């Protein structure tokens, strides 16, 4: 008897991306995140595009993918609220608090999440953590404040590095830069997010605790598991 080979991480992402379709409200506009897991969701969403009005997107990359598949994309200013926002995460704890921003889209992700009544987080099982802090924390910053903010993280025991692309500071969809911070222990995600949000020059900190996930869908080798619902 042969043992079935374990699913790859990308296959787990595809599984959970497809499972998120059950949360899409027919006739409504859906909030769409960014990343490789969300790309699977977008591809699956194309199969029901005639049943939705369209999407509000959290990045240029997701907008391009949605449009290429014939899904209308609305500006966030055109909608008052969304029933649901679907996005991935770099890590998520058992309470739905997340670290996000590995794809540099954290600011728009937080904005679209804020419009939604429900945040459905879709991840493969490697993203589950007992406490936040394993993944380097992305922080979008105004370029002139980068060194000052790096020193503030150093005072908390962290090390901030400018994210580079082709040897130059990466420029986000909003024209800003990203610091990736290691060495932090985020024991109080809500308090930490509030604290860093106050620092001049911080556009968005990648801790999502004030807008934590309300549903956690996890792709595992045993199938898709719902970890919590708030
Ligand atoms: C982008 C994000 C993504 O949700 C996060 O990086 C996870 O990405 P992936 O699904 O590719 O693992 O926050 O800014």
Image: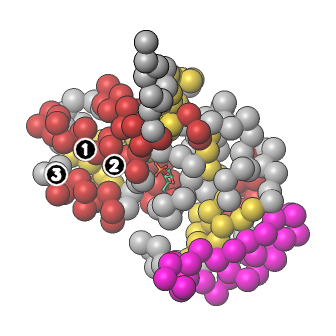
Residue for point 44% across, 28% down: 5
Q: Relative to residue 43, is residue 179 depicted above or below? A: below
Name the image quarter holding the N terminus.
top left
Dot 2 beta carbon under 8 Å from ligand 1? yes
Q: Which mark is residue 21?
A: none
- As for residue 154 lying within the magenta part, the answer is yes
Q: Which residues are magenta?
A: 143-170
Residue for point 24% across, 39% down: 45
Please rate how many residues cluster around mark 3, counting C-alpha atoms within 10 Å: few if below 14, some from 14 to 19, many from 20.
some
Disc 3 is placed on an element classified as loop
Residue 26 x, y percent position in the rendering: 21, 29
Q: Which residue is mark 2?
A: 39
Quadrant hosting residue 139: bottom right
Q: Which residue is mark 3?
A: 69
Mark 3 or mark 2, earlier in chain: 2
Q: Relative to residue 222, is residue 108 depicted above or below? A: below
Question: Which of these two is toward me, 211 or 86?
Answer: 86
How far is disc 3 from disc 1 in space, using C-alphas? 8 Å
Q: Can residue 208 be seen in this snapshot?
A: no
How far is disc 1 from disc 2 in space, using C-alphas? 6 Å
Residue for point 49% across, 82% down: 166
Name the image quarter holding the C terminus.
top right
């Amino acid at each position: 008897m042969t043992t079935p080979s374990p699913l790859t991480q990308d296959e787990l992402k595809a599984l959970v991306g497809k499972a998120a379709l059950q949360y899409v409200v027919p006739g409504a506009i859906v909030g769409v995140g960014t990343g490789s897991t969300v790309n699977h969701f977008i591809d699956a969403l194309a199969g029901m595009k005639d049943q939705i009005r369209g999407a509000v997107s959290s990045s240029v990359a997701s907008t391009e993918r949605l449009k290429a598949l014939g899904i209308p994309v609305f500006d966030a200013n055109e909608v008052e609220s969304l029933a649901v926002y679907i996005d991935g995460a770099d890590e998520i704890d058992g309470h739905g608090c997340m670290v996000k921003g590995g794809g540099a889209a954290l600011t728009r992700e937080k904005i679209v999440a804020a419009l939604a009544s429900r945040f459905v987080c879709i991840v493969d099982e490697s993203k589950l953590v007992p406490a936040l802090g394993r993944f380097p924390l992305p922080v979008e910053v105004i370029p002139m404040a980068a060194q000052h903010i790096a020193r503030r993280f150093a005072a908390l025991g962290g090390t901030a590095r400018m994210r580079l692309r082709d040897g130059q500071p990466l420029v986000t969809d909003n024209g800003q830069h990203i610091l990736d911070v290691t060495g932090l222990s985020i024991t109080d995600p809500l308090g930490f997010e509030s604290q860093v949000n106050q620092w001049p020059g911080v556009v968005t900190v990648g801790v999502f605790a004030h807008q934590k996930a309300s549903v956690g869908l996890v792709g595992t080798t045993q199938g898709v598991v719902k970890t919590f619902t708030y």
